[in-house]
Amino acid sequence: MITRIEQETIDLGYKLGKMLNKGDFVALKGDLAGGKTTFTKGIGKALNVTSVINSPTFTILKVHKGDTTLYHIDAYRLEGNEYDLGLDELIDEGIMVVEWPEYYESYLPKDYILVNFKYIDDNSREITITSIGDKYKKIVEGMK
């Protein structure tokens, strides 16, 4: 799907967020400025997160309290240095959203939702949502 303004990207994240449950894992992959954090704002809105959601590039992990806790991770700075951040200990306590999952691949769960972002221009993004494994197939179908 194509989003043409920031609010459409937030709305798409919101739609996904409404279908997520504690223990779910979402991986966001794509270009710099591709809309990953904007999409996460929509997930947070669906979870009634009241804190500001911005990129956790320098902190790697930000924890946002809502109806369900949102763990927002940016693995970009981990490139070439995979560290065990203890994701497996957090996943059952909330919803995990990881930007740049390709830099943390060996720690990804067997099943997760993969959201790919392709930068088209300053306003437009092509976003594809895929189920890796069987667990999230119904959610992905519901996003169409």
Image (cartoon, helix red, strand yellow):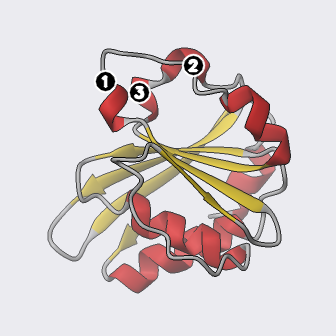
For label 3, the residue is 102
Residue at screen point 42% across, 35% down: 75
Answer with mark 1 or mark 3, whichever residue precedes in sequence.
1
The residue nearer to you, when weighing 124 against 46, is: 46
Cα gap from disc 3 to disc 2, whole angstroms: 14 Å
Quarter holding residue 130: top right
For label 2, the residue is 84
**Is residue 1 shown to the viewer in this render?**
no
- Tag 1–tag 3 contact (CB < 8 Å): no
SS at mark 3 in the image: helix
Residue at screen point 75% across, 72% down: 66
Q: Which mark is nearer the camera, 2 or 1?
A: 2
Q: Which mark is nearer the camera, 3 or 2?
A: 2
SS at mark 1 in the image: loop
Residue at screen point 57% across, 19% down: 84
The residue nearer to you, when weighing 122 against 79, is: 79
Cα gap from disc 2 to disc 1, whole angstroms: 13 Å
Circle 1: residue type: Glu
Q: Position of residue 63 (x, y in %)?
A: 62, 56
Circle 3: residue type: Glu
Circle 2: residue type: Asp
Q: Residues within 10 Å of mark 3 (few under 14, many from 20)?
A: some
Q: Position of residue 2 (x, y in %)?
A: 37, 69
Image side of residue 124 versus residue 94, left or right: left
- On screen, 92 above or below 127? above
Residue at screen point 23% across, 51% down: 32
Q: Which mark is nearer the camera, 1 or 3?
A: 1
The residue nearer to you, when weighing 6 against 96, is: 96
For label 1, the residue is 79
- On screen, 92 above or below 66? above
Q: Residues within 10 Å of mark 2 (few under 14, many from 20)?
A: few
Q: Position of residue 42 (x, y in %)?
A: 56, 74
